[in-house]
Image (cartoon, grey):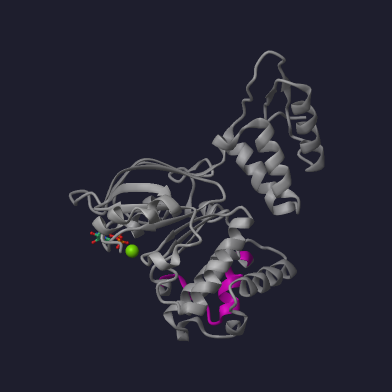
Amino acid sequence: MSINLIVICYNVNHIILFLFFAIYHKYLCFGLVASPWYNIYIFPSFLFIDIIQYIKRNNDYSERILILITSILEVKDLMKAVVVKNLSYRYQSEGAEVLKNLAFEIVQGEIVVLMGLSGCGKSTLAYCLSGIIPHCWSGIMDGEVLINGKNTREFGVARLALEVGMVFQNPDTQLFSPTVEDEIAFAPENMCLPPVRIRERVDYVLDLLGIGALRDANPYQLSGGEKHLVALAAVLALDPPVLVLDEVMSQLDQVGKKNVADALEKLRQQGKTIITVEHDLETVNFADRIMVMEGGELIRYDRKEILLADRDFLAACRLV
Ligand SMILES: Nc1ncnc2c1ncn2[C@@H]1O[C@H](COP(=O)(O)OP(=O)(O)O)[C@@H](O)[C@H]1O
Ligand SMILES: [Mg+2]
């Protein structure tokens, strides 16, 4: 048996738990080291997060198992879906910094709303979180972005797409298929999923977003709001654990906004981590935390209730 996970357990409960974990999920490449004198556990965090994602995709009881494991092992620290360290970005080498030394972390399963006036760098940060920067833009990026422990510099866009899906502010740039169904099926087909699974995923995301009626429509003939929903559906078809949404609500009517808010809540319950750019305070009820940017800097990152109660701050930022 090869060892690719080493755990130091300090009591017999941990050993039993991990053996159960390994056998139940057929993780046989599993190494275990028990040490009665250390009250710590040591293993590569990226591996732990991979295992968690494996469970989440394959087990209806994932939430209960996760709660059990995290409470016993106190590993919440390792469940950071997004870690941004000293992130700066310039579109041109001689140009001004559009992102200035950003540093923050997002815990897995949270919805974070990103706000700020136009031009403050929200879309640029969204590109960094999804790996489009640095892979598809030629500017200068300093610092690091880790998605589920994976450094975006070290993984290609295709691999990162399994970790993080992004819906662009302008969805026209990411829609290219003749029908909505083809658009949603494109990525799963590329991954060579069996047709039955592809059909299931298409049906699931159409239903989740309440856009079943658009199945045979041509994406180019849809309204801006509907295009955002189709782009979101196409991203969700790959089932990435992290979602980055850039103003997907902005062109939706009240019904569309409610559909998206309900869908985000369901996705959060599935354990997805969601970063969504919004400019309307009325639509941020579903958020756990709110990030506010100004001039390329992160000036506030707080729980929604605290931030929304700080009317002076919101007024100073011209968000109300
Ligand atoms: N492709 C680009 N080349 C050069 N500058 C850009 C480019 N895209 C955006 N910018 C500049 O970066 C800054 C931040 O833009 P952006 O991230 O789109 O802000 P936001 O999404 O908050 O409106 C703006 O000053 C904008 O003009
Ligand atoms: Mg933008």
Q: Is residue 145 visible in this depiction of the protein?
A: no
Magenta-drawn segment: 173-188
Write the residue at 49% across / 53% down. 288
- x then y, percent, for residue 198: 68, 69
Q: Nearer the viewer, residue 162 or 125?
A: 125
Task: Pinpoint residue 235: horizontal percent, then vertical percent.
Answer: 54, 65
Helix, strand or loop for the magenta stretch, by majority: helix
- Judged from the image, the quadrant occupied by ligand 1 is bottom left
In the picture, which quadrant includes the C terminus? bottom left
Query: Is 186 within the magenta?
Result: yes
* Quarter of the rendering containing residue 7: top right
Can you say whether 75 is above or below 155 in the image? above
The residue located at (65%, 16%) in the rendering is 38
Q: Position of residue 101 (x, y in %)?
A: 30, 42
**In the figure, is residue 265 to the left or right of 30?**
left
Is 197 a magenta residue?
no
Number of marks in the rendered image: 0
